[in-house]
Image: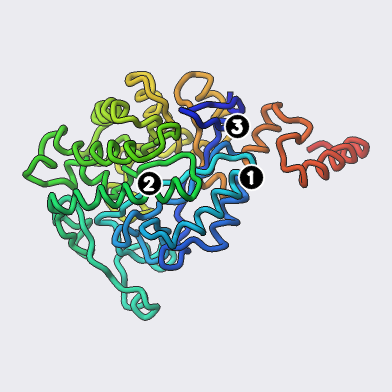
């Protein structure tokens, strides 16, 4: 099943392997560079069904770091279009994740500390900017204090999402994902640990879900009807008193009604830095988040994408065969092996003749295989 095509709305993926959005912190004023083209292009060459551009900020203050990609300006379209075009040329479906970092914005790049900006960052020309969140609750004592978003701000933000969606469509992306996980803006509306508002966007579960659902509806209204919409969620906060899987099931029902096609099932991140999410309850073992995708898929009747320490083709295949998810997302495993999908096809006996490899590679590899057999060398 891992190499069965899947059709979602009018878009057909050649297989069920998706490369997750992974921030590279290497953009220049929000513009992608050659690094992003090569980084994402090799995953398309490597046989993935869909390849996601990293969390891409819908407004400048929504970046995690100075190195984040953005889609708040028309000037950012050409670079993104180049990536989408190349990914498509290699047979993969080009996808992009729209994001807003909220109270996790204005941080140092991971290799510069992965926390609040310091004097060393200032010396590199990277200074703080004002950040926003549902309320003025910072991540911790040493972190920037966000400004609470007013109702006028929320309307303006929905406009930023709409504009970003139109740019993503113009750039040629065929799948769009909203980032509603890992302690970023939309997630902080959901979690009772980060949303202390007293108006209709805070308090009860229905109120805390209101803004993310409104964003999903706005995005769906301008994203072409034939193109799929995903939403990445933290299925649980993995912190005492936080967002639960039961909450995510209820949210997923609303998202399905709003026109979301796939729920991308991650977890955690409401506390701590952007890439070092604090987990206190959930053991990180291979496939530890697959049960979330399973429960949401089968209780809500919506497609799900499983992600999180999915390491082997057999593990991915078992999840699909058991009906626990519809898509399998790999992230760091793809960094370790950009050809993971092609190697998985070999391991599962789907492509013994290297037919799925780029023609420029497969031609050589078939001859190498013949030589190895003559020499009695087994791989």
Quadrant in which the N terminus appears: top right
Residue beneath disc 3:
14
Name the residue tied to disc 2: 165
C-alpha separation, residue under disc 3 versus residue under disc 2: 24 Å
Q: Dot 2, crowdedness within 10 Å: few (<14), some or many (≥20)? A: many
Q: Dot 1, how many residues are within 10 Å of its Cα: few (below 14), some (14-19), or many (20+)?
A: some
Residue at 82% x, 36% y: name it.
378
Query: How busy is the neighbourhood of tag 3: few (under 14 within 10 Å), some, or many (20 plus)?
Result: some
**Which image quadrant for residue 82?**
bottom right
Compute the Cα span from label 1 to label 2. Answer: 22 Å
Q: Nearer the viewer, mark 1 or mark 3?
A: 1
Q: Which residue is tagged 1?
A: 89
From the viewer's side, name the closer residue of 206 and 13: 13
Q: Is residue 322 left or right of residue 371?
A: left
Q: Quick one: quadrant of the C terminus?
A: top right
The x, y position of residue 186, in whole percent, is 26, 45
Q: Looking at the image, which is closer to me, 101 or 155?
A: 155
Which residue is at the far left? 198
Q: Is 76 or 130 nearer to us in this picture? A: 76
Q: State the SS at label 1.
A: helix
Element at label 2:
helix
Q: Are marks 1 and 2 in contact (CB under 8 Å)?
A: no
On the image, the x and y values in percent for residue 73 come to 38, 60
Instruction: Give the CA distance from mark 1 to mark 3.
Output: 13 Å
Name the residue at 36% across, 55% down: 57
- Colour scheme used in the picture? rainbow
């Amino acid at each position: 099943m891992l190499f069965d095509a899947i059709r979602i709305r009018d878009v057909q993926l050649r297989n069920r392997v998706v490369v997750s959005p992974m921030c590279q912190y290497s953009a220049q004023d929000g513009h992608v560079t050659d690094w992003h083209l090569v980084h994402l292009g090799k995953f398309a060459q490597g046989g993935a069904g869909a390849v996601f551009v990293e969390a891409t900020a819908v407004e400048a203050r929504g970046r995690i770091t100075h190195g984040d990609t953005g889609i708040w300006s028309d000037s950012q379209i050409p670079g993104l279009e180049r990536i989408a075009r190349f990914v498509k040329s290699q047979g993969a479906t080009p996808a992009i994740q729209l994001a807003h970092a909220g109270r996790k914005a204005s941080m140092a790049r991971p290799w510069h500390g992965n926390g609040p900006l310091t004097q060393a960052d200032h010396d590199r020309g990277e200074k703080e900017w004002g950040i926003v969140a549902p309320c003025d609750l910072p991540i911790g004592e040493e972190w920037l204090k966000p400004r609470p978003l007013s109702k006028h701000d929320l309307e303006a933000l929905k406009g930023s999402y709409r504009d970003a969606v139109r740019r993503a469509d113009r750039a040629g992306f065929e799948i769009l994902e909203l980032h509603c996980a890992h302690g970023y803006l939309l997630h902080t509306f959901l979690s009772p640990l980060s949303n202390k508002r007293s108006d209709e966007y805070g308090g009860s579960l229905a109120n805390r879900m209101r803004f993310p659902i409104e964003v999903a509806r706005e995005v769906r209204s301008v994203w072409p009807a034939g193109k799929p919409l995903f939403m990445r969620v933290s299925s649980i906060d993995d912190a005492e008193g936080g967002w639960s899987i039961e909450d995510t099931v209820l949210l997923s029902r609303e998202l399905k009604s709003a026109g979301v096609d796939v729920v991308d099932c991650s977890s955690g991140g409401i506390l701590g830095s952007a890439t070092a999410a604090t987990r206190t309850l959930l053991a990180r073992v291979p496939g530890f988040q697959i049960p979330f995708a399973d429960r949401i898929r089968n209780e809500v009747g919506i497609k799900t994408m499983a992600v999180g320490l999915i390491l082997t083709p057999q593990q991915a295949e078992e999840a699909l065969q058991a009906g626990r998810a519809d898509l399998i997302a790999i992230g760091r495993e793809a960094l370790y092996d950009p050809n993971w999908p092609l190697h998985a096809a070999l391991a599962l006996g789907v492509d013994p003749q290297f037919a799925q490899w780029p023609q420029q590679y497969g031609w050589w590899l078939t001859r190498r295989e013949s030589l190895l057999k003559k020499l009695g060398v087994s791989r």
